[in-house]
Image (spheres, rainbow, N blue to C red):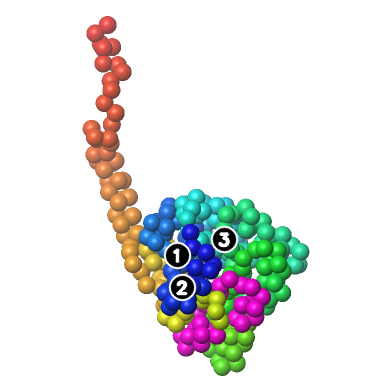
Amino acid sequence: MKSTSDFIEMKKNNEKITMLTAYDYPSARQAEAAGVDMILVGDSLGMTVLGYSSTVEVTLEDMIHHTRAVRRGAPDTYIVADMPFGTYHVSREEAVRNAIRLYQESGANAVKIEGGHLQKFIHTLVDAGVPVVGHLGLTPQSVGITGFKMQASSREEAEELLDTLETFETLGAVMTVLEAIPGDLAVKAAERVDIPLIGIGAGAGTDGQVLVYHDILKYGTGKPPKFVKQYGDFDEIGVKGIKQYVREVKELKFPDEQTTYKKKVYEDENNQ
């Protein structure tokens, strides 16, 4: 399993880091088999696999449950787990308790928090021994305020993001996700700090990339965001396969001889 020091070394050597957002045992198994460097168990699981309307509905229990499944599927991969909405916003004491619980019970290697206003919280968690991943730019837990659009698009906002990123590094964050920001800002950000920066919708200038399993494989999702590239079409393959199953059952083609146990427990009944 790679460690945070391995990721820092990859950044120094200009070796790109791959992160995939996955939420369960089979997708984690595939990610590990494919050689993904790290897995993010994102609170986007609320919409992607639980059918919630937003990430706001995701609970700490949801995150622990799904992260544990991912750990079982990818025992040798570095895993980051999102702290869900409301678990680190009320008080510092409650936030630390929730973060420790997520880290301790889920099997994750680090927890991720969203927003640039949480510097003191990062410091407290690091002091408590919990590795922290930051998240700047578009933060999905705050889209009710910011909207789903590019962030840090002005010079002033860009400088504020860079300053926050430097603070994150000083406070001990092990890496940071940058989402939906201008590509030239991402380049400057990667040059400004030594911790790895993982981009999503931030161009090629970051130290690595993250996309969602269900997005890149077109699995139960709608139209993807602009920054997503799809590498498969599970929806087409899956629906096609299920349709064939339905047809064969109705046409008495399944089960057949090859899928039926052959032993006859009543073969001598008529001879008695």
206 relative to 240, above or below: below
Disc 1, SS: loop
Instruction: Give amino acid for label 1.
Output: Asp
Q: CA distance from mark 3 to mark 1?
A: 13 Å
User: Is disc 2 in contact with disc 1, using a CB cutoff of under 8 Å?
Assistant: yes
User: Mark 3 = which residue?
Assistant: 109
Give the side of residue 69 with respect to residue 171, left or right. left
Tell me which numbered mark, 3 or 1, is placed earlier along the sequence: 1
Expressed as whole percent of the image width and height from the top left, the position of residue 79 reads 52, 61
Expressed as whole percent of the image width and height from the top left, the position of residue 146 reads 59, 80
User: Mark 1 = which residue?
Assistant: 37
- Does residue 154 show up magenta in the picture? no
Q: Quadrant of residue 136?
A: bottom right
Give the side of residue 75 with respect to residue 136, left or right. left
Residue sitting at x 57%, y 88%: 158
163 relative to 72, above or below: below
Relative to the observer, which residue lies in front, 78 or 42? Answer: 78
Give the side of residue 238 with respect to residue 224, left or right. left
- Main SS, magenta residues: helix
Relative to the observer, which residue lies in front, 258 or 158? Answer: 158
Disc 2, SS: helix
Note whether residue 144 is visible.
no
Which residues are the magenta region?
Answer: 165-192
Instruction: Give amino acid for label 3.
Output: Asn
User: Mark 2 = which residue?
Assistant: 10
